[in-house]
Amino acid sequence: QVQLVESGGGSVQAGGSLRLSCVASGYIDRTYYMAWFRQAPGKEREGVAGINSRVGSTYYGDAVKGRFSISRDNAKNTLYLQMNNLKPEDTTMYYCGIAYWLYDGVWSNWSNYRYWGQGTQVTVSS
């Protein structure tokens, strides 16, 4: 069994930065895909950034390219999301997820992810 715990959310003004962390416990295989998603009330979960743990390649949603950066510390079983130049439209809950495989090859498809954390709230004021 795998458990994920996010932290690092909070309230910042537009243009500010936050770094989210996601600590994984249990058995973690370094070949897993890991990703950050966000979900506003009434909307579908949106892929923010993903990382292929096997080769280290990273992926980003169009809305955050150039502002957010995903990374992973394998020794600490921790996934990070550095968020810079935050905008009010970035306000929502953020979740980390683990996928054993991308069944349709799409990292941003939330249904590929088997384990999820409880989420951390990010609020950006204008």
Image (cartoon, grey):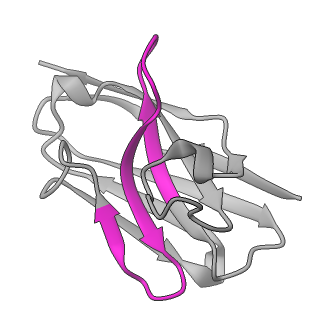
At 32% from the left edge and 65% from the top edge, which residue is drawn? 59
Residue 43 visible to the viewer: yes
Q: In the rendered image, which quarter contains the N terminus? A: bottom right
Please provide percent x and percent y for residue 79: 52, 64
Left or right: 26 as drawn, with respect to 70: right
Please provide percent x and percent y for residue 15: 10, 38
Q: Is residue 92 magenta?
A: no
Give the magenta-colored segment's residue range: 35-59
Give the total number of marks visible in the rendering. Answer: 0
Residue 7 visible to the viewer: no
Please provide percent x and percent y for residue 124: 24, 25
At 73% from the left edge and 79% from the top edge, which residue is drawn? 29
At 83% from the left edge and 72% from the top edge, which residue is drawn? 27
Left or right: 77 as drawn, with respect to 33: right
Which residue is at the front of the view, 107 or 5? Answer: 107
Please provide percent x and percent y for residue 53: 53, 79
Above or below, 56 against 33 in this view is: below
